[in-house]
Amino acid sequence: MKSSINLTVLLFLLPFLGIAQVSLGLLVGAANYQGDLAQNITSLNETNFVIGGGVGYKISPKVDVKVQLLRTKLTGDDANYPDRVNRKFKFESKVTEIAAMFEYYILGSAERSGTGVFEPSYTPFLYGGLGFSKIDNVAECYSEDCKNNLKNPFPEENFTPNLFTLPFGIGVKYDASPLMAIGLRAGYRYSFSDYLDGVSAAGNKKKNDWYFVLGTNVTFYLAKKKRL
């Protein structure tokens, strides 16, 4: 709730900071997971849809600061791995993430030339920030012993639905017009928790969980960008 209030305040204040620098964005893509129910290479059949949106503010030709809201589902199943198939754990987590991030455009954003003619251009970029996620998780064991309630380990006692994440990654942006840019991005979310999948003590409690996001984003500028 507090995060939602902060986002609302930011949305209210951004227009007063200089309308020429404000942007709205949409992200669609795919997410996958790395944790107690996945091995070093995640299973492609556990890839899930991602959708997100956010607001941004351009603070220099090379740096944007953004607040982004993202929704996805993460899944995992021991049936994907022959050496774990007898354990028979699986999970599904619905993830709602809000994150504040900086984007650094290595070549700078496209600007109007001295003659006033817009010149479309590409630039690679890096991004990173801090996120907060709410997890709606269901972890279960479907072996015969677990079905008979002999040793069902879930839900685990220390599971928490709220966790912090570190989003970071790379991408490329194409400034297609003075009012629109499109891009492709890929990056990780490192969670400060081993409960992204709801499994810790019953799995590997020495390592925290991650998830990966690959997506295409479209950014709309609320007014034509000015030279800074």
Image (cartoon, grey):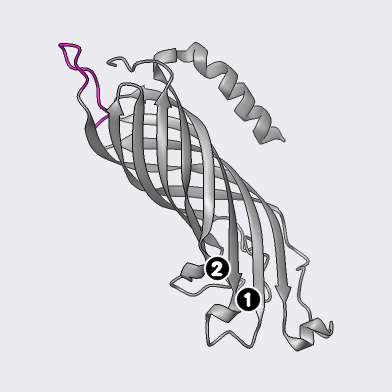
Residue extending furthest right? 149
Q: Are marks 2 and 1 in contact (CB under 8 Å)?
A: yes
Relative depth, front residue between 219 and 188: 219
In the image, residue 117 lies in the stretch drawn in magenta: yes
Q: Which residues are magenta?
A: 107-118
From the top left corner, tell me how far across and down residue 91 is, in percent. 66, 68
Q: Which mark is residue 35?
A: 2
Q: Which of the two labelled residues, at mark 2 and mark 1, occupies the earlier sequence position? A: 2
Task: Please tell me whether the stretch drawn in magenta is mainly helix, strand or loop.
Answer: loop
Question: Within the magenta stretch, is there residue 60?
Answer: no
* Residue type highlighted by circle 1: Gly
Relative image position of residue 118 (x, y in whole percent): 22, 20
The residue under the point 57% across, 22% down is 11
Q: Is residue 54 left or right of residue 122?
A: right
Residue where numbered disc 1 is placed: 203
Asked if residue 90 is positioned above or below residue 174 in the image, the reply reads below
Q: Residue at x 50, y 62 (%)?
A: 47
Judge from the rendering whether residue 220 lies leftward or rightward of residue 115; answer left or right.
right
